[in-house]
Amino acid sequence: MQFKNLFAMFAAVVLLLACKARDFNSDLRGKVDNPDARQTPCLETLQRNAPYTPEVLNQQLTAALNQAATSKFFEAENFRDLLFSSEVEVAARGALKAELFLGDNCSLIRAINESRTKPSHFYWLTGNGRTSFGGMALYKGDIYAEGFYRNRQSGVDGSLFTRKKYGLDELMNKQPWFEWSPQTKKFTPRLGSPGARLVSHIAADQGTDAVTLYRGTNVKFADKLTALATLNSFAFGNNFGGIFSTPSYDAAKGWANPVVLKSRLSPKSLSDAMAAQKPNSPKSPLVYAGVEFGYVEVAFLYTPGDKSNLFFDNVVSKCIVQDKSQGGDAAFASPCSQ
């Protein structure tokens, strides 16, 4: 009996340690199993135009998190989008140490390099190394709460990741993120929509006078009126649905079944729509923006029966992902060529 109790306690400790994988190397791409326990040389080199070194990122992110707490700019709940539950209490006191973010520098260098052109999910809230419940993503120096909509739309249970369900106003106005200043080499804590900032990054990446967004969908919901007729499963509060899109063609292609819609909007119209966040006025355009895994997501809110929608009103083309098409799908549009 004593042996059974000892074994149960040992198993519980192992399980707890497995669930606490939280360093930068919790990204499986950065893990290296070395049975000889020798240091594996890092082949990653920080690129010359990287916004910061791993050391500066660690120091300044810790400082910004503590500042958000001591200034009362963030409440304890806001830290839950970024950190493990066990770290939230310390973060809310403004007592985080930079050691929290120490991990595999090789993976972190890779993430910083990648973030120059696309979001890079670098701090995973994961219990098994595969399923993520958010954390933080780098993008052009800034830091965003990964999966904010995904995790807050329905809430997250469990002691490691607990987060409450958010309504419309909170989804649109309670997103924590950190803006990087190349001049001061510091992060500024932000709470609200990062939409305008993300639009400026997307426009800079695309290098044109219009922002191109893609949406993966099926033949039925590629039709505007059909898509807007009823509330879809991407709810914002009780009365709005979301038409999700992304500037990443590859991400949209992954979601396609088998249709990819392409929409082109002026950066100003998109930024204006994101700024016009008046949840109590259904006539006001509402656009959500955030980061999910390795891409930006932009959702155009609508109420059932709407006749217009900023994404659909600016669709310029549609195509079919051939290896996903079935039956008569191929006749709906030309094959995707990208």
Image (tube, rainbow, N blue to C red):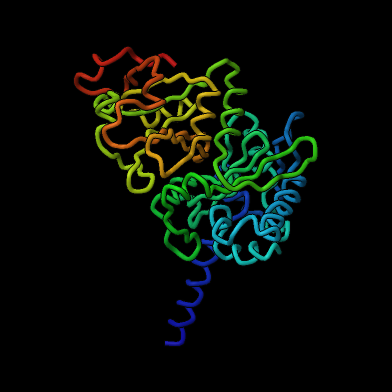
Q: Is residue 6 above or below residue 217?
A: below
Residue drawn at (71%, 55%) of the image = 67
Q: Is residue 2 above or below residue 113?
A: below
Horizontal relation, residue 93 to residue 215: left or right? right
Residue 295 screen position, x and y as percent? 51, 34
For the N terminus, give its image quadrant: bottom left
Residue drawn at (76%, 35%) of the image = 182
- Res. 164 image quadrant: bottom left
| Most distant residue in the right direction | 184
Horizontal relation, residue 75 to residue 326: left or right? right
| Most distant residue in the bottom direction | 1
Residue drawn at (58%, 57%) of the image = 79
Residue 193 seen in render: yes
Q: Is residue 207 above or below residue 175?
A: above
Residue 38 seen in render: no
Residue 77 screen position, x and y as percent? 54, 59
Along the line of sight, the residue nearer the viewer: 322 or 199: 199
Residue 13 screen position, x and y as percent? 53, 71
Q: Is residue 200 above or below residue 151?
A: above
| Most distant residue in the left direction | 327
- Res. 196 image quadrant: top right
- Res. 312 image quadrant: top left
Residue drawn at (26%, 26%) of the image = 225
For the C terminus, give its image quadrant: top left
Horizontal relation, residue 158 to residue 189: left or right? left
Residue 203 screen position, x and y as percent? 58, 23
